[in-house]
Image: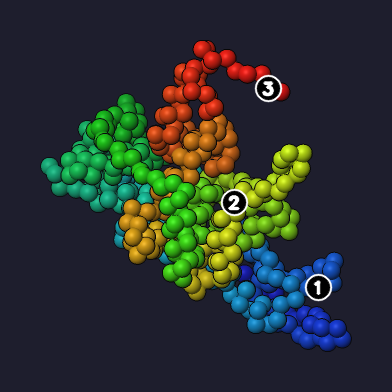
Amino acid sequence: MVEEPSGQQAGTQPRKRRRSAAKGVSYEIVLPKYVQPKVLESGKTGFYWVLPTVYKKAGCPWRSCTLGENLSQNELDIAAEACMVRLNEWRENRNRQAPEVRSLEEGHFRFGTVGWLLDYYVTSDAFIERVAEPSRADYLQIFKRVSMLRSLTSGVRYGDVHVREFAVLTAIAVYHLFSDTGKLRTAEKVIIYCETAWARMQPLFPHLFRRDVPNPWSGVTKKRREKKTKGHVGRKPVYQFAWGAVEKGRPELAAAAVLAFEFLMRPSSISAGYAEWSNYRSPAAPDKFKVRHRKNGGEVDHPLEAKILFNDKWKTVRFYDEAEQVFARVPRRSPSIVSKRNGALYGDGTLLSQEVREMADQLGMPEFTIDKARHGGMTELEESELTEGQGKALSTHRSSAYRLYAKETEKRVLTATKRRFGISENEESPSESKPKKPRK
């Protein structure tokens, strides 16, 4: 549990700074918690909300942000409050999960049992450093279900079975208790999560594990599962939804759809506030939008405009003109572009996705989802015939999972067929029978 910083840094003793509100007029400003002033080169006073080091070390994803220049007391209080709401939400979620992380159930399992092993794993660095925070709750839920599950023959909880006595046949029995009831995806998670826990803990406690088969989960054969292919939506439906949401008074939902499609952001990153106003046309990069991705920590500076030579004249081209028109309709309620009406973040969970679906139903677009918008953006990358490296650079993917997002659309198949037979966009017959004309 993170302790509250004390002293002047914590804001327990509000500091006062005198600045000029107009020529010859000065007054005192009470600095809100974690707010620091700075005199700029222009002579104006800039205000910044700075995250204490104790929260940075605890893993809080938020950092310092600019509140504004020459703000009044009321403006400064409102701007700082939005940052404090975001920090307090993170602290509440962290504290709420702390008891669950410490134990899989009320009352600890005996040393050396499966329940104890899984309980120890979720408190170890192997779990905290390697498993992203959004995924931890899922691991805990799976481990708890495995530990509380009872054998159909003996009635004993699997969490009370000693690790050395947990054989391959036992792992298979646990797997079938999930798969035989049709929960194939959950059964797969049981194998993946438990196999990882065994592999991470075996070097620490080798005397607790079987010597013949240290990891019994590696001997489980998974059933074949027909995986559903997620749908996607194109550019036209995305902006149809966006402008419809703006007209309905929900511009934050419009921005969420645009961020997912144009900037390839995951819904979890959007709802957690990883698209920030301070990174959109910032003073340091006025022609770029820095997008951060929560899952892998990736960052990419999306260029918003560029000068291109047309007919011997340089012309500034805005790449995301319509997207920026949508952003212009979003009120700046918090440091995040997408937030609730009270300035709080949507946070972990599916609330943002639910509200997007509800808005889509009101607009007569029942098939539209924020997830499909992102998959549509990934598909557009492939339809534009970008290389895999270019696509990964835009989406910050780091693995082969990138290939799974683009859908096999008719446009992609047609383009591939034309290339196969040597037909370019400006030709109607193969290049072998119709030689290209030399360019002037």
Circle 3 sits on which residue?
439
User: Can you tell which of label 1 and label 3 is closer to the viewer?
Assistant: 3
The part of the image, by quadrant, that contains residue 394 is top right
Q: Residue at x 42, y 29 (%)?
A: 414
CA–CA distance in space, label 3 to label 2: 32 Å
50 versus 426 height, above or below: below
> Foreground mark, 2 or 1?
2
Q: Which of the marked residues, 1 or 3, is nearer the chain's N terminus?
A: 1
Q: Nearer the viewer, mark 3 or mark 2?
A: 3
- Residue 173 visible here: yes
* Residue at image coords 72%, 46%: 315
Q: Amino acid at mark 2?
A: Tyr
Tell me if 251 is positioned left or right of 280 in this view: left
Sort mark 2 into few (<14), some (14-19) or many (20+) by Cα contacts within 10 Å: some
Quadrant of the rendering where the C terminus is positioned: top right
Nearest the eye: 69 or 95: 69
Relative placement, left or right, of 173 versus 298 is left
- The numbered dot on residue 44 is 1
- Which residue is farthest right? 24
Q: Locate residue 19 relative to residue 131 in the image: left or right.
A: right
Please give the residue where the numbered disc 2 appears in the rendered image: 320
Q: Front-most of 334 and 294?
A: 334
Tell me which amino acid carries mark 3: Arg
Residue 434 rendering spot, x and y as whole percentages: 54, 15
Query: What x and y, as percent, mark residue 421?
Result: 46, 18
Element assignment for label 2:
loop
x and y, in percent, of residue 89 in the image: 49, 67
